[in-house]
Amino acid sequence: MFLPCKGKAATNGAKLILLSPALAVLGVLVRFKLGSPVLFRQQRPGLHNALHSLQIPHHDRRPGQPGNLLPDAERLPPFGRFLRSTSLDELPELWNVLRGDMSLIGPRPLLIRYLNRYTPEQARRHEVRPGVIVWAQVNGRNALTWEQRFELDMWYVNNLSLWLDLKIIALTVWKILKREGISQPGQAIAEEFMGAFNV
């Protein structure tokens, strides 16, 4: 829910102006700490599998070496861990909310290659727009297994309501402050989803 308004372009422009200072500060910090490019663009499936471009900060590579991903043991440098634990790495996704590609709250937009790995039930996560804030995020975040995350996605899809979204926002703030469930044990990032029979 919490879908963006589909009004005039001026409305979205005004929202972007309000968001710009925070994005500018984040961009400067990423550029200074990790080098360039500040963001990389990746296609992700959204509502009804429609593709959109997701802007993601480069926080998991060596400074000055774009695209050179590290082993899990080294993957997140201190500043990258800070971005991940505070969820500041998700701030650029608010642009996708303003564009209407995403909602503030909904299932996490995952990789395109996962589409043919879902069961029919898991694929129902694309019946709603993907979100910046996620129900699974407040129930374990990346410490959950893929199976648990999809179960939570389905529960969210089946129980959409304004009150649930308000609860998720409140719980998200609490989780960020406590910095719980940032990654799976022994993993800097979530391991790849290989399909329904490999969860």
Image: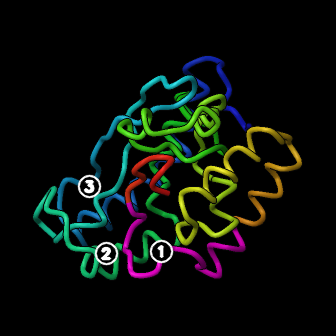
For label 1, count other residues whose C-alpha is less than 10 Å away and answer few (under 14), some (14-19) or many (20+).
Answer: some
In which image quadrant can residue 180 be found?
bottom right
In which image quadrant can residue 136 be found?
bottom right
For marks 3 and 1, the one nearer the N-term is: 3
Residue that numbered label 3 is attached to: 38
- The answer to which of 148 and 59 lies nearer the viewer is 148
Q: Position of residue 104 (x, y in %)?
A: 64, 44
Tell me, for residue 174, which label it has, or none: none
Q: How many marks?
A: 3
Residue that numbered label 1 is attached to: 184
Local secondary structure at mark 1: loop
Q: Residue at x 67, y 47 (%)?
A: 153
Q: Is residue 138 above or below residue 182?
A: above
Task: Give the extent of the magenta segment.
Answer: 173-191
Q: Is residue 125 above or below residue 76?
A: above
For label 2, count other residues whose C-alpha is less than 10 Å away and answer few (under 14), some (14-19) or many (20+).
Answer: many
The Cα atoms of the two marked residues, 3 and 2, are separated by 15 Å
Which quadrant of the figure contains the N terminus? Answer: top right
Residue that numbered label 2 is attached to: 76
